[in-house]
Amino acid sequence: MAMGGVCEAALLRVLVLQLAWVLVGGQVRYSVPEEAKAGTVVGRLAQDLGLEAGEPEARRLRLVSQGRRASVEVSGASGALVVSSRLDREELCGKSAPCSLRLEVLVERPLRVFHVELEVTDINDNAPVFPSARKNLSIAESSLPGSRFPLEDASDADVGANAQLTYSLSPSENFRVEEENSNSLSKSLFLVLTKPLDRETMPIHRLVLTATDGGRPPLTGAVELLLIVLDVNDNAPYFNQSVYSAVLPEDALEGTLVARVRATDPDLGVYGEVIYEIDTIVPSSASAAFRIDEKSGEIKLTGALDFETVALYNLNVKSKDQGTPPLSGHCKVVVEVLDVNDNAPEVWVTSLSVPVPEDAAVGTVVALLSVSDRDSGANGRVRCTVWPPSPFGLVSTFAGSYSLVLQEALDRERVSEYDVEVRVEDGGAPPLRASRGLRVPVSDVNDNAPAFAQAVYTVLARENNAAGAELARLWARDPDEAGNGRVSYSVAESGGGAAVSGVGWRPASSYVSVDAESGRLWALQPLDYEELQVLQFEVRAVDAGEPALCGNATVQLFVLDENDNAPVLLPPAGGGPGAGAAGSAASGADSLALWAWATWGAPAGQVLAKIRAVDADSGYNAWLRYELWEPRGKGPFRVGLYSGEVSTARALEEADGPRQRLVIVVRDHGEPARSATATLSVSLVEGAEAVLAAAGSGSLGAGLRTAEGGASAASTTTTNVWLVVAICAVSSLFLLAVVLYVAARWAARSAVLSGPGPTTFVCASEVGSWSYSQRQSRSLCVTDGAGKSDLMVFSPNFPPPPGSAAKETHPDASALLQTVSGAPCLASRPSPNAFYSCRPSRSSCRCEPGSAPES
């Protein structure tokens, strides 16, 4: 039953709609208020067009656009007409009323077109608006009460009652507002003078005119009326623009045209002649920067612009006529200044921490800097660098601030002071630059130990020097400054010493001392070569820093021999009259008396006796030669120059007498030479007497003398060879010391001479002799390419020590083959009375037998 009622109601509704459709000629009308929200349903279009459910979508029910935005659309599923965007009646229809939109609706299968009319109703959404918020009126003081002054009325975009305006004026005893209906379409608004004006009492009247519409709730709009009371001249000049704009670069030249203003005055005669002037300038300090031509209205630049000082100028320009009083009009000229890159960047040192210690850690802040540029934009963007780029660098802390920090380790001894230049550059085109110099001294720390100029010093000192004599000057360099570089010298406590015969070990400090301040090395006592040949010790240099640093150098003191010992004569071997009929009567340090027998008819060359002597010196000072002092001339006897053997120069005759007295002088080769004298008494006897004399003395006579004389000659020859070797060794040692001294001056390391060693041969191309030293010797082979002199080996003049074996006297042959500096020196065991001539070549030194010279 209920279902049947619903169906009947629906059927009735359809019949009514169809009847309405026929009555309106097939057109549907809807109404919607403006400003309806999007999605608002305007009407059920599909249902009103008689479409069944599902048909709107199946038959593609849609609106057909006619080139005007409808702000409504058909929902595809429901077929309802809904608001799609903002509806603004004033935008769609303006002041037209009513505001109707005609829409066309299209359906397919079959194709039919329906007309829909949509009326947008007005709401009070617009307040009354006056043309300007402020209205200036000039009213002649002579105006009579009842005078009317037209006003611009307000407008309201709404329609109907919402647009019906009423006006009211703020309270005034001189004015009122009045509306007048000139016709049915418009109204005129007037300001009516109700009381005479008195300019001296009130030259300006300020009133507010309010317009109110008829909406619910009502909306209002207002305008301020500025009423200026004028005398007679009732028209003021006015400008064609209220605001003029101009743009100038800050480097614009004087005389540049800024702007041209123009004002007109509708009055005639002098009341219409307009002159211009700059009323005010903001800021006021720029009053001299602009000038206006009072006739043409041209504004020109008369001063310099500075963007950094003022970036915008406001010029209030006034135009006035020639009335009495004159009427004026006003306009504003806005001058914008453009920045140019006319300011160089600046850098300041806000903090400086100097001097910087040379052991300062990397990252230590040395100075704080501040940079700025008065320009703006890219012209004021500053880039900061430091030169030289090391050892300091810049670290940006925040905008415009930098820290000068240490980036590398410092060394005051290499660079004691840095001149740092901080350079800044802006981003202008072209860029401007500036710089600031900083002097950063480096303070010293004790980081350098004293260093001697040589690692090894070779000092040559002659013996018998005076106590306190200066031997050498040592110098150590410490590049630090002040106390850190002040060096004091001392002999190291464990710096060395020497072994002294009969005394033992003695420290170096007992021989030498060094001045603490000057480094002067001086002797504490006279030196004796026979006691000390080489003294090696260390000298220490210590600075005054905290903690103190030190350096060492080795000093090798070579004592040079002086000829301070005379030859000493030795008694004959065996302690009594020698075999061979020789003996001694008396002996002393520098003289000796000997006697010997010789047989009549002894042949030439027979050895009668041998003078033996030794010299405590070394080298040439110990090299002895023997001379027959008496008798002079050609006698029957002769003495070997270096052997000391007394032999017959010819066969002995009876005419030579029974006794011969020989005075033999033994000299060394020193400067000056020292000598000793031996007296030899030779008795000439028959052969039988000589045998008896020899038997009486416990010997075998001349026959035994001959056999033993050969052995003695062999031993003395070997001894003499060692003497020559000692001379050569001393000479070579001196040469070596000179070479080492020169080499140590230029080489980083010097060759250190070896310590005392075994006795060896020394081969030297410049010495010219073999020498032997009783104390010590060193091996050195000096060759300079081609040999320039011979090396001579002389027969020895020393007898073998009692009880000594032959091989203790002579060096082993294998020890004579040595290679020094790549040049082998070859020698064999010398035979008695042998002479060797050694001539060095470029790669070797070879000795060959030769004949012995006399001297």
Image (cartoon, rainbow, N blue to C red):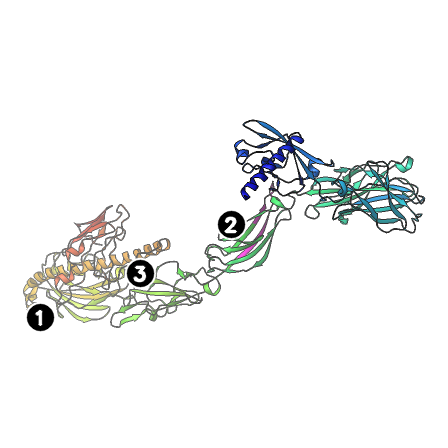
**In the displayed structure, would residue 513 be above or below residue 220?**
below
Name which quarter of the figure residue 74 lies in: top right
- The amino acid beneath tag 3 is Glu
In space, the residues marked 3 and 2 are separated at their CA atoms by 67 Å
Q: Label 2 belongs to which residue?
A: 388
In the rendered image, is residue 686 in sight?
Answer: no
Residue 200 pos. (x, y %): 92, 50
Front residue (pair 127, 532):
127
Residue 713 pos. (x, y %): 13, 60
Start-end of magenta stretch:
423-440
Question: Which disc is residue 697 wearing?
Answer: 1
In space, the residues marked 1 and 3 are separated at their CA atoms by 42 Å
In space, the residues marked 2 and 1 are separated at their CA atoms by 102 Å
Q: Is residue 430 magenta?
A: yes
Q: Residues within 10 Å of mark 3 (few under 14, many from 20)?
A: few
Which residue lies at the image location 32% right of the left edge and 54% below the top edge? 739
Name which quarter of the figure residue 751 lies in: bottom left
Is 147 positioned to the left or the right of 164 in the image? right
Q: Are marks 1 and 3 in contact (CB under 8 Å)?
A: no
- The amino acid beneath tag 2 is Pro
Residue 469 pos. (x, y %): 39, 67
